[in-house]
Amino acid sequence: MRATATAQPNIALIKYWGKRDTALNLPAVGSISITLSDLYTRMTVDFDDGLEQDVLHLNDEPNDKLLPRLSNALDIAAGGDRPKARIISECNFPIAAGLASSASSFAAIVVAASAAMGIERSVGELANLAGRASGSAARSLYGGFVELENSGDAVVVGELLSADDWPLDVVVAVTATGPKPVGSTEAMEISRKTSPFYDRWVSDQPDDLASARDAIASRNFSALASIAEHNCLKMHSVMWSSRPAIVYWNDATLACLQTIRQLQSDGVAVFFTIDAGPQVKAVCDPADTATVEAALSATDGVRDILTSGLGEGARLT
Ligand code: DP6
């Protein structure tokens, strides 16, 4: 009753922010993301009747902080009456700093737990289970360019283009490594209840999704850049206009945006996106990756640079 799965984080270009059902964790809006190749979470789930409680080892250290949500994901994937489990997780990038570590963790644990229990599930079923644990995790079941459609009582997730169809790179400028002040689950609810812009955010999303879908289908970089930056800034405007305000940015976040604006005016094919954290993700044409890495490394306050191509969905390893 043991299995290991690997999943990569995904970065949303058209963002998920807000829930229409908190009990089932159903998103209020559809979203479009790209799955990365070089950052990963590898998760082993070992169900053991002899254990009295779940235990988690993260990068060889016992970890109680992340255990409750992972135990909940095991309940979702294997049922509340499942045996207790030993969870061994290995992650090669900073956790809980807005780098979508939850997406890769929940995608990997749902795949590993299903296999460890001997339950065969389609990718769509696994995506729905991962999405109940964390909305963005549903997208990490797929590779390349992924759309999550928000319809009915389940989410429909599918691949728009594979990683090989349109190779792009993502350069992550790490501007802080500590955990974020407020997690996205809680922050989304604050936005839904208090931001005067929230309803408009939800009602505009189908147009942004359509624009991004068209840009991806025609591999039109500047059209994708334009809609992705707009959608990102709109999501952060919803956060900033929430009460209390949710501000994940720091000085270096803004400095990175200025660096990217300068690169764009020099003709470099690059655009930014930012999630629930202070890191800036620069999406670029692989021909420009070295230029983007050099410019972001030289930006004040940038502590580290992580670069990744686009990769495949979660799988058993
Ligand atoms: C800003 O998927 O972490 O990264 O469903 O509550 O676990 P929960 O939220 P989560 O939120 C991700 C928010 C985002 C945008 C995105 O990835 O689409």
Image (cartoon, rainbow, N blue to C red):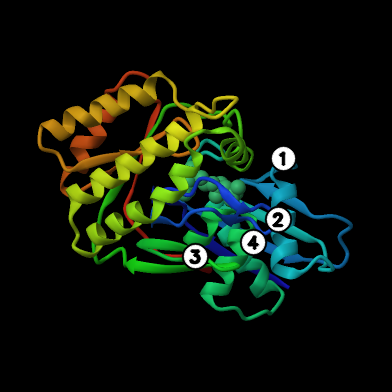
Q: CA distance from mark 1 to mark 3?
A: 24 Å
| Earlier sequence position, callout 1 versus callout 3 | 1
Disc sitting over residue 44 in the figure: 4
Which quadrant is home to the N terminus? bottom right
Q: Residues within 10 Å of mark 2 (few under 14, many from 20)?
A: few
- Whether residue 100 is visible: no
* Above or below, 284 relative to 261: below
Q: Residues within 10 Å of mark 4 (few under 14, many from 20)?
A: many
- Tag 2: residue type? Ala
Where is residue 167 shown, x and y percent of the image? Answer: 24, 58
Q: Which residue is mark 1?
A: 65
Q: CA distance from mark 3 to mark 2?
A: 22 Å
Q: CA distance from mark 2 to mark 4?
A: 27 Å
Where is residue 275 shown, x and y percent of the image? Answer: 45, 39
- Tag 3: residue type? Leu
Q: CA distance from mark 2 to mark 1?
A: 22 Å
- Tag 4: residue type? Thr
Q: Which residue is mark 2?
A: 23
> To which quarter of the image does residue 284 belong?
top left
Secondary structure found at label 2 = loop
| Earlier sequence position, callout 2 versus callout 4 | 2
Where is residue 198 shown, x and y percent of the image? Answer: 50, 40
**Which of label 3 and label 2 is nearer to you?**
2
| Earlier sequence position, callout 4 versus callout 3 | 4
| Earlier sequence position, callout 2 versus callout 1 | 2
Residue closer to the observer: 148 or 11:
148
Question: Residue at image x 53%, y 61%?
Answer: 138
